Amino acid sequence: MLALPTLVVTALRNNIDLRSAELGPRLATADLLLARAGFDPWLTLATQRGRQANDVLGISPRATQTSDSSSATLGALFPVGSQVALSLSNSRVSSDPFGITSALPFPTSHASGLSLSFTQPLLRGFGRAGTYGLVDAASASVESARFRYARNADAVIALVERAYWTLRQAESDELVLRRSVDASREIYDRNVALQARDVATTLDVLTSERGLATRETQLWEATRQRTDAAERLLFLVYGEEARGATLLQAPYVHTTPDSAVVPVVPTLDAAEAMAFAQRSDVAAAGRDVEAGRRRVEQSRNQRLPRLDFVASYGYGGTAPTARFLTFADSADLRSSIWTLGFSASFFQRNDAALAVDQRAQSAWEAARLAQMATVNAVRAEVREALRALQTERDRYLRAGDAARLGEREYAAAAEGARLGLVTTFQLLLYEDQLAQARLLVSQARFALEDAGTQYRLAVGDGRRGYAPAGVRGEMK
């Protein structure tokens, strides 16, 4: 027996289309990580050793100078555009031979220093929108991708529900035709027995046999359609796992029996309000517009000239012995420096930034138009779903009336045939009409369930009652 909730949960785990849709949030998350990478702190380490030799041929002896230096710089760029860098340096320089005219104050000089620099954009790159806009846009795109994945999950659930009810209808049709075959066989056996007693004619036997053969061919076709429906459902639910023993079960699987629930049709205003509050594609369209707006804000900012406020401070010194930023001896040399100023640069024609801005503007407008199209599509789908739900509800109730009348009509015809008032041909017609009425109930039941699925998909309520669909393997 196949239970619909179990099938839906399995499909959310195995369905190939949904597994493919999982890549959307993962790719969007990778883009977000890439955009954030530019704001990661950086650390630069450097070390080097050098040796310089000088001499004047025939006049002065060779003089050598050996140096060892190392430095470290830690910097960071903040979302508001500010950039800070802290640098530490240490070096050792020795001269051989050392002369009073040497550029170094000591035979061996040890120098160390600390510097801090700060840069704040005042036009281009100023504020969060000018610097961090692409990261904010990527974050909105991640949310949009997750919403679209959720909508894909809703669509997969709707597909599973429809495949399930298609199988249920095929089972019901097969059952109706099997009952029709049994009734036809009963008529045929009765006529054969009556002919043996010279009560029924050969025509009665032939007519009943022809009716039995016709219904048996219909039953075979219904059995094939049920097996096809079962296989389609298994492929949809199990994805890559739909092979071997799983498919061999198709002729034997059946849905879980239940009773039809006649729904209450909501009002149009209530259905539209629910759709706009719950549908993931509506939320995704809104996040796409937000991402486009963020990109436009940054692209506009990049068209401004660059004007930066810059400041720095440095402290250091030189000593004859190894030490770091401590200069206490009388012969030590120490120094400090600070700077404040502005740095400006202008473009004659900033065509690259203009092109990026125009592209961002067009993408934003396209996202806004797509959002409007999504809103209209939601309204249209809700209206269609409500009409379908109301129509199929009334149709199912009336089909039940037709089936009950058909049952009474056939019972009366069977009694008439027993009394010799109804011919075999007429009895088969009544039985065929009863079978058609039962098939109509089966079709109406499937149409009602399909309308319910259509309505839940239209208002974004398809996942209620099932396990939530999560994005597997999502980057954090």
Image (cartoon, helix red, strand yellow):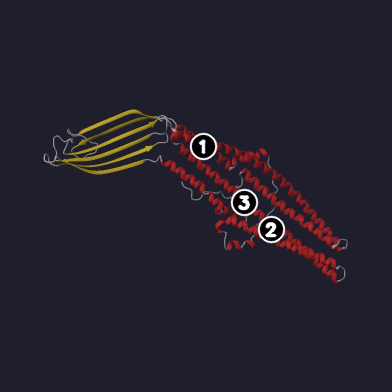
Name the amino acid, label 3: Leu
Query: Few, some or many C-alpha atoms within 10 Å of disc 3 (few <14, some 14-19, many ≥20)?
Result: some
For this rendering, which residue is in front, 333 or 99?
99
Three-letter amino acid code of the residue under disc 2: Glu
Residue assigned mark 2: 171
Tag 3, which secondary structure?
Answer: helix
Q: Secondary structure at mark 1?
A: helix
Decide which of 124, 441 is in the foreground and name it: 124
Residue 292 numbered tag? 1
- First of labels 1, 2 by sequence position: 2
Name the front one of labels 3 and 2: 3
Q: Residue at x 53, y 52 (%)?
A: 19
The numbered dot on residue 447 is none
Q: Nearer the viewer, mark 1 or mark 2?
A: 1
Q: Is residue 124 visible?
A: yes
Image position, residue 232 (x, y; %): 62, 57
Q: Earlier in the sequence, mark 3 or mark 1?
A: 3
Q: Position of residue 339 (x, y in %)?
A: 31, 29
Q: Amino acid at mark 1?
A: Gly
Q: Quadrant of residue 6?
A: bottom right
Rendered residue at 67%/43% (across/down): 384
Give the alpha-carbon distance from disc 3 to disc 2, as whole Å. Answer: 18 Å
Q: Which residue is mark 3?
A: 159
Q: Reading the chain from its start, which is encountered first: label 3 or label 2?
A: 3
- The image position of residue 139, as x and y in percent, is 48, 40
Question: What's the CA distance linking mark 1 and mark 2?
Answer: 50 Å
Residues under numbered marks 3 and 1 in contact, where contact means CB atoms less than 8 Å apart: no
**Residue 73 shown left or right of residue 460 in the figure:** left
Dot 1: few (<14), some (14–19), or many (≥20) neighbours within 10 Å?
many
